[in-house]
Image: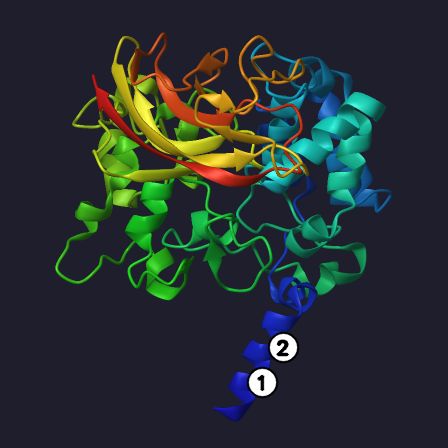
Amino acid sequence: MYRAGILVLALTLSPAVALAQQPCTTDARMVVNELYRHLLERGADAGSAGWVQQLEGGQSNVREVVRSIAKSPEHAQRFHKTEAGEGTPYERSVAQLYRHILGRQPDATGMRVHAELAQRSGADAVIDRIIDSNEYDQQFGDWGLPGSGGVRYCAPGNRSASQASAPQPVPVAQRRFRGMDRDNDGTITRNEWRGSRQSFDVHDWNNDGVLTGQEVNEAEARTGRTVEDESFDRAESFEYLDMNNNNRVELREWHGTASAFDRLDVNNDNSLSRVEMNSAGGNTSAVATSGQLIRVNGTERWTDTGVNVRAGATLTFDAQGTVRLSGNGNDIAGVGGAQSGRRAAEAPLGNQAAGALIARIGNSDTLFVGNRRSMRAPVGGRLYLGVNDDHLEDNSGDFQVTVTVQQ
């Protein structure tokens, strides 16, 4: 027992050691195929043979292949660009790079910092910073495959020992959660969770603010409930679940039970289409529950409400609170905007009062909320709330908002 405890402690403290204990594959073709699928979101073509040869010959490692594919003209043309409705230019491009390289959604700070880097130095600088980061080192090192659920290519010096060992898939009950544990501490915090606030709370049975043990095992259900009761992904929007934006939801993107996923996957292609998500009780347009409080932090560009709406739905807001908009103690805003009435030209809505409550739905243009009691949703999708300010880092405080949706 003592030895076992020491071993567990050693693996916990050293992610690199833990990675080294996992089997690896010598199939370079499989590795390259997987990288094309995850990074370029398509199958490998004849041009991929060069990467296979470099891996087999030891001229390159997986990390450098990932770097080269991410910097390729195809990836740049498809994913490195600004889009209408962005709070900060290149933020969606940065989000795509996070999903392709780190396998997760960006946190607010990472989004801002890397979007600003993209504006100054281009996407290649962002790619280098992400791939050279400590997080990438811990998750993948030189030989791990992003988005593969733990598959690694055998380093040249480790091939003989691993020749007979096929990569062991992460158990179905754990494969989606393992990739979320970015700091490899055995727990998943709210910042690491890829789903909505509601889905996190459903898993957090003991309400301690982190997910551990049975809480991250999709084969388990809380006492008094069945596993199917926990299949809350049916209330998530298709766009929110489709992390790599390939217009289908795969099991690794799904947060509910495998059995619920299989039941919705009527054509058995191991992915869910929009039609499948909206059939068999899987309607993705949820109705918000009155009384659910959402805190809109003044330092975050957008706060995910966890609420999905249909185009034309009536949104009712009950909002209060104040946000300080700068180091000036008198620069205070309520949900209607700055008490001084000032505006911020570079804010998402430069023609409206600085600091006012704003919203967007999916990838829509920014919508002014302010003191308005209700509004109609111009489009369908996930509802996000924010503060209409041009510089968020020196803000403090938050708005407390309750949203009710009548579809």
Asked whether disc 1 touches disc 2, contact meaning CB atoms under 8 Å apart, the reply is yes
The location of residue 102, given as percent across then percent down, is: 62, 41
Q: Amino acid at mark 1?
A: Ile
Residue at screen point 82% across, 31% down: 125
Residue occupying the far bottom of the picture:
2
**Alpha carbon separation for disc pair 1 and 2:** 6 Å
Which of the 4 quarters of the picture holds residue 35? top right
Secondary structure beneath dot 1 equals: helix
Label for residue 6? 1
Q: Amino acid at mark 2?
A: Ala
**250 or 331, nearer to the observer:** 331
Which of the 4 quarters of the picture holds residue 385? top left
Name the residue carrying label 2: 10
Secondary structure beneath dot 2 equals: helix
The quadrant of the rendering that contains the C terminus is top left
Residue at screen point 28% across, 17% down: 275
**Residue 33 against residue 165 in the figure, above or below:** above
Q: Is residue 44 visible?
A: no
Residue at screen point 60% across, 60% down: 23
